Image (cartoon, helix red, strand yellow):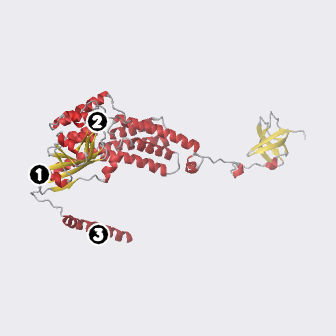
């Protein structure tokens, strides 16, 4: 009865929320009339990476579906991945809706490249754009091939909207001098808002959205702002190239420790959670489909079969191949995924060895290793030891070669000679007992 009341209460709360939703929208006045132009604001913030690329693509698709009249990219980014920036630039060029890049703080490196691919650029006072040199993951200048590709991309982005390409090239190449802007051959070009306006790299300077819309000559606009959902924020974090090997290391280490611990506990939860985060982030970002997760789960089940039903190693090999294949299908870069898998394998091996060797008999890891032993001192007795037989004298009923039977009083016992052969009918003496083992020797007593 109590459960039924709880269910009715829950359904009532949902119904009230549905009924109040239109009232909330009316209170906010968020109704668009038929003659209002629709302006879509899309934030391009933080690092440029594949998660931001997926968010931008979703936002552009939504703007097209809603029939937006203008798209504004509010850019504030220090730059990021070249491949993600290239994909974002192509998405902007393939969109038929007019796009304005509004630099509200900084559009550096890949951010500047994205801004150059918009139909026009508007900058806020105090904002900057430029400094677009290509660097590798270690922070060093990229090789000549990558530099040449990036310079060509910067030139194309500038010429896309009839801008002088020398300024775009100076953003990525230190050897280019710009005397009129006091840029020597030892520094990269970074344009301020006024400089960008001066060299035709910005069409206007606007302090806020109202001034921006005034410049765009859009009156009475209905403004729609795209927001990064929690799932997309999590996906952007999870798909970061630096986070991927960490997640894989936690996942593999947790599962390895769980296999050696009784029951299901913290290591297993930790490992499964890390791997679920990995696949969830890549699913949301659009890099993976459900087939990747299915392949990974199938591989894991095959490994479990190999663990609990040891065979010829076939299930284990197929399981490892399935898990690796699932991760490769889910990745945006096969090369980086292989590197991440290598890192996680090394970390898992080292940590597992340290854990089992130095912490195996202490703390929570004590449960993972069997340290108990059975002994008679602890009360573990498999057979009763008859110490009272020691010293008794009897007669061998059978030849002892070295085992046989002996008669002690009226009790017949299985005995074993202390050394050599003893003939039948000889006098024997019990010299020691241990469990069911009774040791005798021939005697003249």
Residue under label 3, please give it.
12
Looking at the image, residue 226 sits to the left or right of residue 233; the answer is left
Question: Which residue is outermost to the top?
Answer: 144
| Residue visible at 53% across and 48% down in the picture | 261
CA separation, marks 3 and 1? 47 Å
What secondary structure is found at the residue carrying circle 3?
helix
What secondary structure is found at the residue carrying circle 2?
loop
Give the mark nearest the N terminus, 3 or 2.
3
Which one is in front in this view, the residue at disc 3 or the one at disc 2? 2
Which one is in front in this view, the residue at disc 3 or the one at disc 1? 1
Question: Which residue is outermost to the left?
Answer: 35
Q: Label 2 neighbourhood size at 10 Å, few (<14), some (14-19), many (20+)? A: many
CA separation, marks 2 and 1? 34 Å
Image spot of residue 245 (x, y percent): 41, 41
Determine which quarter of the picture holds residue 303.
Answer: top left
Residue under label 2, please give it.
188
Image quadrant in which the C terminus is located: top right
CA separation, marks 3 and 2? 62 Å
Depth check: give the residue in front, 39 or 23. Answer: 39
Image spot of residue 140 (x, y percent): 36, 33
Image spot of residue 298 (x, y percent): 39, 42
Depth check: give the residue in front, 115 or 291. Answer: 115
Depth check: give the residue in front, 388 or 206. Answer: 206
Q: Label 1 neighbourhood size at 10 Å, few (<14), some (14-19), many (20+)? A: few
Q: Label 3 neighbourhood size at 10 Å, few (<14), some (14-19), many (20+)? A: few
| Residue visible at 35% across and 38% down in the picture | 328
Image quadrant in which the N terminus is located: bottom left
Residue under label 1, please give it.
217
Residue 427 in view (yes/no):
yes
In the rendered view, would you say 169 is above or below 283?
A: above
Give the mark nearest the N terminus, 3 or 1.
3
Question: Which mark, residue 351?
Answer: none
């Amino acid at each position: 009865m109590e459960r039924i009341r709880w269910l009715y209460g829950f359904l009532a709360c949902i119904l009230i929320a549905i009924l109040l939703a239109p009232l909330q929208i009316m209170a906010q006045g968020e109704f668009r009339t038929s003659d209002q132009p629709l302006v879509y604001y899309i934030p391009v913030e933080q690092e440029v990476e594949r998660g931001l690329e997926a968010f931008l693509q979703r936002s552009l698709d939504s703007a097209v579906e809603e029939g937006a009249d203008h798209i504004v990219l509010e850019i504030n980014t220090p730059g990021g991945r070249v491949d993600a920036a290239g994909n974002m630039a192509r998405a902007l060029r393939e969109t038929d809706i007019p796009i304005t890049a509004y630099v509200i703080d900084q559009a550096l490196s890949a951010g500047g490249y994205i801004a150059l691919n918009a139909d026009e650029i508007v900058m806020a006072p105090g904002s900057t754009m430029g400094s677009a040199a290509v660097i590798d993951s270690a922070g060093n200048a990229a090789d000549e091939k990558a530099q040449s590709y990036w310079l060509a991309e910067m030139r194309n982005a500038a010429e896309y909207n009839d801008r002088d390409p020398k300024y775009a090239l100076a953003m990525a190449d230190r050897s280019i001098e710009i005397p009129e802007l006091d840029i020597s051959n030892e520094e990269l070009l970074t344009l301020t808002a006024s400089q960008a306006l001066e060299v035709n790299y910005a069409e206007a300077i606007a302090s806020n959205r109202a001034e921006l819309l005034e410049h765009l000559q859009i009156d009475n606009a209905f403004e729609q702002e795209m927001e990064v959902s929690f799932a997309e924020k999590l996906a952007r974090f999870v798909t970061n190239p630096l986070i991927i090997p960490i997640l894989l290391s936690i996942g593999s280490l947790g599962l390895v420790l769980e296999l050696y611990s009784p029951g299901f506990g913290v290591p297993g939860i930790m490992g499964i959670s890390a791997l679920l985060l990995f696949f969830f982030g890549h699913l949301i970002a659009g890099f993976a489909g459900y087939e990747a997760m299915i392949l990974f789960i199938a591989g894991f089940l095959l490994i479990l079969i190999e663990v609990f039903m040891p065979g010829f190693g076939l299930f284990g090999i197929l399981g490892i191949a399935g898990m690796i294949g699932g991760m490769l299908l889910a990745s945006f870069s096969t090369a980086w995924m292989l590197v991440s898998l290598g890192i996680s394998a090394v970390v898992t091996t080292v940590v597992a060895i340290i854990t089992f060797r130095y912490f195996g008999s202490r703390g929570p890891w004590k449960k993972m290793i069997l340290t108990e032993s059975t002994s008679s001192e602890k009360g573990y007795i498999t057979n009763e030891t008859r110490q009272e037989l020691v010293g008794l004298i009897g007669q061998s009923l059978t030849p002892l070669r070295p085992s046989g039977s002996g008669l002690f009083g009226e009790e017949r016992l299985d005995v074993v000679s202390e050394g050599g052969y003893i003939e039948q009918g000889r006098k024997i003496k019990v010299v020691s007992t241990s469990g069911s083992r009774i040791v005798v020797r021939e005697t003249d007593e």
